[in-house]
Image (tube, grey):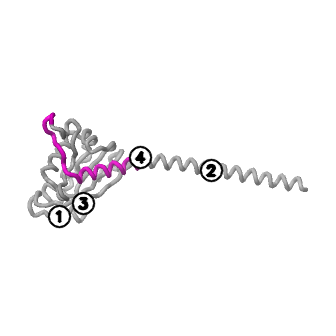
Amino acid sequence: MFKKRGQFWYADFTLGVLVLTAIGIFFVQTLFDLSEGNEGVTGLIGDANTLSDSLMSEKLGGEGAIYDPFNWNVGKGRLGFINEGKIDMAAFTEVKNYIGSNYEDSRYMFGIENDYIFYFENGFGQYLNIETGEMAGNSEPIVYGHQSIQSNDDLISVTFSGRVIMNRYAYLGDGAGGENNQIIRIVAIAFDDFEEIT
């Protein structure tokens, strides 16, 4: 009788050890999966922060002469268009034109690895064309950065597999039509992949 009872406890003990081992293996695997997934998000967070910091800085350099120490064409300088908290429209136009013709180089100039876009919103969260200071229409090119996403229509017709959004605020003043004094939101998005919604 004692032999059977001991064998019964041994079976319970063995089954318990196997269950705990299986739980331990699943736990360790989950930890590794979480850490691998966070590496991509960490990169996107860093890129979105770097992008928004650069946009909020003062422009340094331009597409000038080769001997210019801050020539954007040789990867020197800084892409930004904010001066003392206010959007410098001349600098914005230069940065916009550079990004439009040199997207891959602009990623290097911003110091980011992932793709990016940025756009502007007014105080009510509506898309804003800062060149006119007015609410933007759906097909108006108001999204800057990645060439596949250039308008409100494009922005709502894609889904991102991984993205981080950073919001910054600046003052849009007399540079955009005179009567458009307002605080606007600069929405900077770093993303790793997207696909069009069909």
Q: Is residue 79 visible?
A: yes
- Residue ranking furthest to the bottom: 124
Q: Earlier in the sequence, mark 4 or mark 3?
A: 4
Q: Nearer the viewer, residue 76 or 167?
A: 76
The amino acid at mark 1 is: Gln
Q: Earlier in the sequence, mark 4 or mark 2?
A: 2
Q: Which mark is residue 40?
A: 4
What residue span does the magenta drawing correspond to?
39-67
Q: Which mark is residue 24?
A: 2
Element type where label 1 sits in the image: strand
Query: Which dot, 2 or 3, sits closer to the camera?
Result: 3
Q: Position of residue 60 (x, y in %)?
A: 18, 46
The amino acid at mark 2 is: Gly
Q: CA distance from mark 1 to mark 2?
A: 56 Å
Quadrant the N terminus occupies: bottom right
Q: Identify the residue shown where x is 17% and y is 64%.
A: 182
Q: Earlier in the sequence, mark 2 or mark 3?
A: 2
Q: CA distance from mark 4 to mark 3?
A: 26 Å
Q: Earlier in the sequence, mark 1 or mark 2?
A: 2
Q: Is residue 66 magenta?
A: yes
The amino acid at mark 4 is: Gly
The amino acid at mark 3 is: Tyr
